[in-house]
Image (spheres, helix red, strand yellow):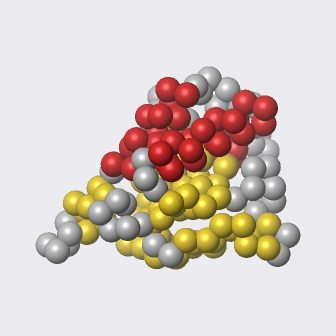
């Protein structure tokens, strides 16, 4: 499992000209799932996202978690994170999990974040989405379970 986490001042996702998720400040998450991932990977990544300290304290150091600043999460499923670009000019997505595996794990990931007390908004799994964000910092972190 791979999560690209971006600290954001605001973020939203739109599907068919309708906003499906929107947050003020917090984390924008692009979530990729491979066919080898399990609930253990989901729990690991959810715990990391909930506990990582990427917000500044009064001394300007990244020392506060999303809980401490009252942040929110926008989670977007992103199978292209497992693109293989080594051969040719067109990426291969054979490392990305099929939808029947990926969607339940993405849903479980979002539920695990909520169980950690976080407000979670989402895109729509498998939809063509327009994602907008204001990256704060910029701060971008990659969390991988493997």
Q: Residue at point 33% right, 51% down?
A: 52
Examine the rendering and report whether any part of residue 85 can be seen: no
Tell how many labels. Answer: 0
Examine the rendering and report whether any part of residue 93 can be seen: yes
Of 111 and 75, which appears nearest the observer?
111
Please, is residue 125 above or below residue 15 in the view? Answer: above
Left or right of 143: which side holds 74? right
Residue 46 spot, x, y in % from top left: 46, 42
Q: Residue at point 22% right, 60% down?
A: 63
Of 30 and 17, which appears nearest the observer?
17
Left or right of 35: which side holds 140? left
Residue 108 spot, x, y in % from top left: 60, 38
Task: Write down the quadrant of residue 21 in the picture.
Answer: bottom right
Left or right of 98: which side holds 111? left
Task: Write down the quadrant of residue 123 in the picture.
Answer: bottom right
Question: Which residue is farthest right?
Answer: 16
Of 59 and 118, which appears nearest the observer?
118
Residue 104 spot, x, y in % from top left: 69, 36
Q: Residue at point 70% right, 44% down?
A: 79
Q: Quadrant of the N terminus?
A: top right
Residue 130 spot, x, y in % from top left: 73, 68
Q: Residue at point 79% right, 49% down?
A: 126
């Amino acid at each position: 499992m791979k999560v690209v986490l971006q600290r954001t001042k605001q973020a939203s996702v739109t599907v068919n000209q309708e906003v499906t998720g929107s947050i003020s400040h917090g984390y924008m998450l692009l979530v990729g799932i491979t066919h080898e991932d399990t609930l253990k990977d989901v729990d690991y990544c959810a715990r990391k996202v909930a506990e990582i300290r990427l917000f500044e304290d009064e001394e300007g150091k990244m020392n506060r978690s999303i809980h401490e600043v009252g942040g929110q999460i926008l989670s977007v499923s992103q199978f292209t994170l497992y693109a293989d670009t080594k051969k040719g000019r067109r990426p291969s997505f054979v490392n990305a999990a099929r939808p029947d595996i990926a969607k339940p794990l993405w849903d479980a990931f979002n539920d695990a974040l909520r169980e950690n007390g976080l407000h979670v908004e989402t895109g729509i799994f498998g939809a063509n989405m327009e994602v907008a964000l204001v990256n704060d910092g910029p701060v971008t972190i990659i969390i991988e379970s493997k």
